[in-house]
Amino acid sequence: MRQTWFILVALAGCSSDSTAPTNSVPERCRDTVEVLCTRNATCAAVAGEITQAQEGAFIDNCKAGAFTTLDCSRQTKILGNPDACDADMMATPCSLYVLQQGLPLPASCKALYAP
């Protein structure tokens, strides 16, 4: 689970292209983190790392860790396609889940947001 937080940092980028109004970017960033943490929690349960009853705490911890390194409130630009990231993450098979590291981050999820 610790690695999952570091993977989420890859969501931040440096480009200046924007595909959404500035006021929706922080919310969309938080939504992306939610999807990534939820999918990792599901796969952690499938892998036996946590129980289904622990999924909520896993998601909360994942988001807390992600938000310490990726401040969504400071993101002003969407550089990629968050919907594609969400779909790709949800389609990532749990068989790729690595204990204590999480799922690999799909290419569509890299450098999605920028301040």
Image: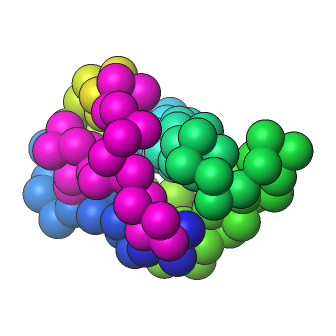
Q: Quadrant of residue 88?
A: top left
Magenta part of the protein: which range? 89-115
The residue sitting at the right extreme is 53
What residue do we see at 78% from left, 49% from top? 51
User: Which quadrant of the rendered structure holds the C terminus?
Assistant: bottom left
Where's residue 29, x and y in %?
48, 45
> In front here: 6 or 82?
6
Where's residue 113, x and y in %?
31, 52
Q: Please, is residue 26 above or below residue 84 in the view?
A: below
What residue do we see at 35% from left, 32% from top? 93
Where's residue 81, x and y in %?
24, 30
What residue do we see at 12% from left, 57% from top? 15
Q: Is residue 77 left or right of residue 38?
A: left
Q: Is residue 51 left or right of residue 100?
A: right
User: Which quadrant of the rendered structure holds the N terminus?
Assistant: bottom right
What residue do we see at 21% from left, 52% from top? 110
Q: Is residue 12 visible?
A: no
Q: Please, is residue 83 above or below residue 60 in the view?
A: above
Q: Is residue 23 left or right of residue 14?
A: right
Where's residue 30, x and y in %?
57, 46
> In front here: 18 or 43?
43
Q: Please, is residue 41 above or below residue 98 in the view?
A: above
> In front here: 73 or 49?
49
Any magenta on residue 98?
A: yes
